[in-house]
Amino acid sequence: METHKQELAPKEVAWLERFGIHVQAEDTSTEMSDIDTVDEVCFKKSTTSKVYLANVLENSGCQTLSAKKYAVKVSLFPYSKVDTILKEIELLQSLDHKNIIKPIPLEHIVKITSKSEAELRIKPENAFMITDFEEKGDLHMALMAQGRFTESDARHYFRQAVSALKYLHDRDIVHRDIKLPNVLLSDDETVKLIDFGHSVDLNSGTLSNHEGESEISSISDIKGTQGYVPPEMLDARAKIMEFHEFGGMTDCDRPKIRINLKLADIFSLGVLLFEMVVGIPPFVNANCRDSCYRSFYFKRKEDRFWRVHSQAKELDEQGQISEEFKNLIQRMLTPFPKDRITIDEIEQHDWLKA
Ligand SMILES: Nc1ncnc2c1ncn2[C@@H]1O[C@H](COP(=O)(O)OP(=O)(O)OP(=O)(O)O)[C@@H](O)[C@H]1O
Ligand SMILES: [Mg+2]
């Protein structure tokens, strides 16, 4: 792959070259793209990155051919290291699935003007990733606009999310931050899983597989978003915090907890599915201090759990939520990882076949 050198800052040249894009000394080619205007996309502000909308004009010579919208995700230093976004790009470039976001090959965006660079506030310590901009936004935004989805619509989105997660799990990759805002919807209602900043390959690195489980020994091993984190991960966090509070100093004392990270992904996906159909989260936190989760699992009062949510959303107690849906949710949100349904079993579940 080759691209043009003009107007690229040294940081960008280094970045392009890291991805095997050779930067030519001079190029007089007439085909070029140019980030013309850059508007900040006002999504929820993240502590680690900002996502901007870039209108890119596809030029041929001095003639503008078309304008296309891209999303530019810029890491925010010092909360996110440049490496985090570079690893995200590297991982995404190695994947090929229609329901997983794909970074734009940079030969399509060869010229980043100094103006847009300033607008994007790209500093040497920042890195960025460019993807197609999805006008429909994420599933959280769609849910806020609609209130809740019919089971049939939710099934349509869920099937695609399951397909993406199966693709990842078959390759021993775990996502570790599945939630509504991390699933985009394209114009033709195709789901795109995004935000692979916490994802890991279980065949390499510190979280590698030991008989299907990974060793969690420090707080930084615990990822995910409140409400989506499974109970076994919350327990692990509590044990590690306790170790620090009681002055555990040596590595021998450090608790080493084994967790199946694929089953942790399934739990988060279960929360996402519940939210799509019911319109509200199933609980605040999946632990026994949470009255909703406690009644659901620890007291085995599933009926009460469904009744409380039905009343909250003014759903009819009978009929509006199917028994197959309830069964699937119960199998995804169980606190016992050994009982939790796997991605292969989800594909065969009656609710998906309807
Ligand atoms: N290609 C895109 N098209 C449209 N919107 C996008 C796109 N990429 C990201 N977004 C929006 O930006 C938000 C943040 O993106 P992303 O999750 O990748 O960043 P993040 O910093 O890791 O976020 P967080 O830490 O909040 O999960 C998404 O929830 C989505 O609303
Ligand atoms: Mg996100």
Image (cartoon, rainbow, N blue to C red):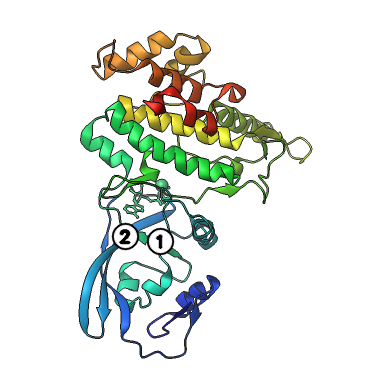
Which residue appears farthest toward the right when viewing the image? Answer: 252
9 relative to 216, above or below = below
User: Residue 290: image x %, image y %?
Assistant: 45, 19
328 displayed left or right of 181: right
Q: Which residue is mark 2?
A: 52
Can residue 227 be seen? no
Tags 2 and 1 touching, CB below 8 Å: yes
Q: CA distance from mark 2 to mark 1?
A: 8 Å
Q: Which residue is mark 1?
A: 74
* Closest to the observer, 48 or 326: 326
Quadrant of residue 222 within the rendered picture: top right
The amino acid type found where label 2 is placed reads: Tyr
User: Residue 126: image x %, image y %?
Assistant: 45, 65
Q: Residue at x 32, y 40 (%)?
A: 139
* Closest to the observer, 114 or 36: 36
* Closest to the observer, 101 or 300: 101
Query: For the residue labelled by badge 2, is the local secondary structure a helix, a strand or a loop?
Result: strand
Q: Residue at x 36, y 43 (%)?
A: 181
User: Residue 245: image x %, image y %?
Assistant: 64, 33
